[in-house]
Amino acid sequence: MRKVLVVEDEVQTRRIFLKCLEFEGFQAFGASNGLSGMRLAQSQHPDLIVCDIMMPDMDGYSVLAALRRSPGTASIPLIFLTAKVTMADLRRGMELGADDYLTKPCTVEQFLAAIHSRLKRHEELSRLYGQVAAPHPLESHLPDSLPLEPSSPDESLPGGFFPDSPNLEAVFHYIEANYCQPINLSDVAQAAGYSPAYLTNLVQSQTGRSVKRWIIERRMAHARNLLLNTTQSVRQISEAAGYSDAGYFTRQFRQLNGMSPQVWRQQSVANLTDSA
């Protein structure tokens, strides 16, 4: 039976959450303050913790920092519960290692959905990291990952095209598997088990780029590969790279590469011929 710890100083809110969890088949524990929550986390080793941020004796940030310092609790997923979330709150939580945020008041459905999503993601990551001998999913690129323009990520980083970031592994894995499809921020967030707002700030803070920019850059790398190594038309290449509108693809290609797809192809082929 899965264990969930709820650290919440509001009695009624805590009771509602605990009842919901028990009804869903979880073994639920409640703590009225941060210090009690820390003790329960250390003695019960829950599978997930939901923790309020604003508490009188020990706030949620202090609880999370203490949990992450202890080997026995460092890997427990934690969802912050708060009445309001500012950019500063998100950044502070991310720096400490928070897994998600729930804004109060939230519905029972939102509460349970966040818990199920985080537990599922934690299971997937545990299985992934347990397969030490398995090849990294982002290291299976073939000639798709051509040298990028200066605006693109540093290709000397581990993993090839995408930067090496354990917190974002699920994000980049999903983009890699689906960049040729019409995906967006919400699709990536759902697949990775994050809320869109949290994922936006997490990716931006750790990579300096947005989720949308990563999708675009991956599509452009594929498009450049096709331009250089095939005789497909620009329309065919735009469709293969995930664009239904060839005109929009051409405009976006020019913005990122400084020239149209046709000119880029001509110059790249000429350069290859000259160096041969």
Image (cartoon, rainbow, N blue to C red):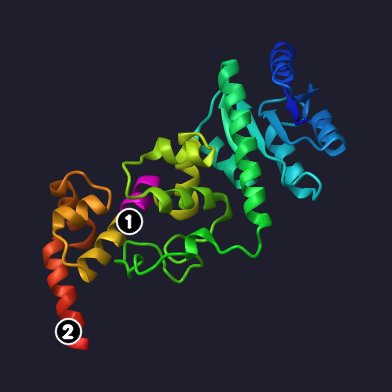
Q: Quadrant of the N terminus?
A: top right
Q: Is residue 110 visible?
A: yes
Q: Quadrant of residue 221?
A: bottom left
In the image: residue 63, left or right of residue 273: right
Residue at the top extreme, as displayed: 12
Residue at the right extreme, as displayed: 43
> Residue at point 62% right, 37% down?
120
Q: Which residue is mark 1?
A: 217
Q: Quadrant of residue 33?
A: top right
- How many residues crowd mark 1 within 10 Å: few (<14), some (14–19), many (20+)? many
What kind of element bears circle 2?
A: helix
- Distance from disc 2 to disc 1, alpha carbons, whole Å, reads 26 Å
Residue 5 is marked as none
In the image: residue 41, left or right of residue 120: right
- Indicate whether residue 215 is drawn in magenta: yes
Give how far across and how far down residue 273 sits, in percent.
17, 84
Q: Is residue 210 visible?
A: no
Residue 273 is marked as 2
Chain part drawn in magenta = 211-218
Between 119 and 87, the one nearer to me in the picture = 119
Up-down relation of residue 30 to residue 61 (above or below): above
